[in-house]
Image (tube, grey):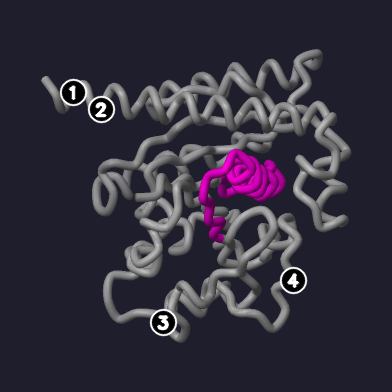
Amino acid sequence: MATIITVSNQKGGVGKTTTSAALAAGIAAKGLRVLGVDLDPQGNLGFCLGVETANGPTVLDALKGTLPVQEAICRTEYCDILTADITLSNGVERTSSGPGEYILKDTLEPVMDQYDYIIIDTPPALNLLTVNAYTVSDYLIIPLASDILSLVGLAQLKETIESVRESFNPGLKVMGILLTRFNKRTLLSRDVMEMAEQLASQINTVVFRTKIRTGVAIAEAPAHGESIFDYNPRSSAVKDYQDLIQEIAETIYLKEVMESAKEDQ
């Protein structure tokens, strides 16, 4: 059964899609089976992984049931992906007469055993698409750019997480807050880190040890149709994402060990 990780923040421009693409490509590079799921109507996850979405099947086809999910999946040199386009904007509300929060979970069910990890990129909004992602996920990662505006609206995000736990997915865990565009030499980055740590304590999580520095390679790689790891593996920001993947692997392993120990007691 796949471990499902959603990358989410209602604010755009915080590195959400970049992080999703980096996790999908980086984890797959370690020999694991990875499916990326793009729930952002902007469709940038596929672009970051070198996919042309024009005229091809998208995640909406699978959500609506017009195609089996297996046929909607696109294979890339990095990982498999369910792409998205602008038609996803208001398509989910019309896909099912049943509980709308479980559409994605029901859609992915037939392929969950075929992957080790499923990475979900969400839209910069707390809408039904985002709730669907939270409902199916094991873990949530919250990217946060190192600026004050990125902190705006996180109280509402906290409420959404608590609501999903109460109503749809009591096992949802916030793995951590990821600081992006981080520069430890600036007072602003240090201030944001301090505030992020306060927020983390409120939602029973942590700020990742790994911080993502600014790097030109992060912005340039999608234009060349390459993952950041292929485009410039020597970039400081790319090395940060490699460290993040290692930290995530350690976190998941420790949580699984702790949960197993509880079950044995």
Q: Earlier in the sequence, mark 3 or mark 2?
A: 3
Q: Earlier in the sequence, mark 1 or mark 3?
A: 3
User: In the image, what residue type sits under mark 4?
Assistant: Glu
Quadrant of res 146: top right
Find residue 254 and report its horizontal and vertical position in percent: 38, 22
99 w.r.t. 145: above or below: below
Image-based side of 225 in relation to 143, left or right: right
- Residue found at x 55% / y 70%: 73
Contact between marks 2 and 1 (CB within 8 A): the answer is: yes
Alpha carbon separation for disc pair 1 and 4: 46 Å
Q: Residue furthest left?
A: 265
Q: Is residue 26 magenta?
A: yes
Image quarter where the C terminus lies is top left
Magenta span of residues: 9-37
The image's mark for residue 259 is: 2
Image-based side of 199 in relation to 221, left or right: left
Q: Residue under circle 1?
A: 262
Q: Residue under circle 4?
A: 52
Circle 3 packing at 10 Å, graded few (<14), some (14-19), many (20+), is few
134 w.r.t. 205: above or below: below
User: In the image, what residue type sits under mark 3?
Assistant: Gly
User: In the image, what residue type sits under mark 1?
Assistant: Lys
- Residue found at x 45% / y 47%: 116
User: In the image, what residue type sits under mark 2?
Assistant: Glu
Find residue 257 and report its horizontal and vertical position in percent: 31, 24
Asked if residue 134 can be seen in this view, the reply is: yes
Q: Residue under circle 3?
A: 65
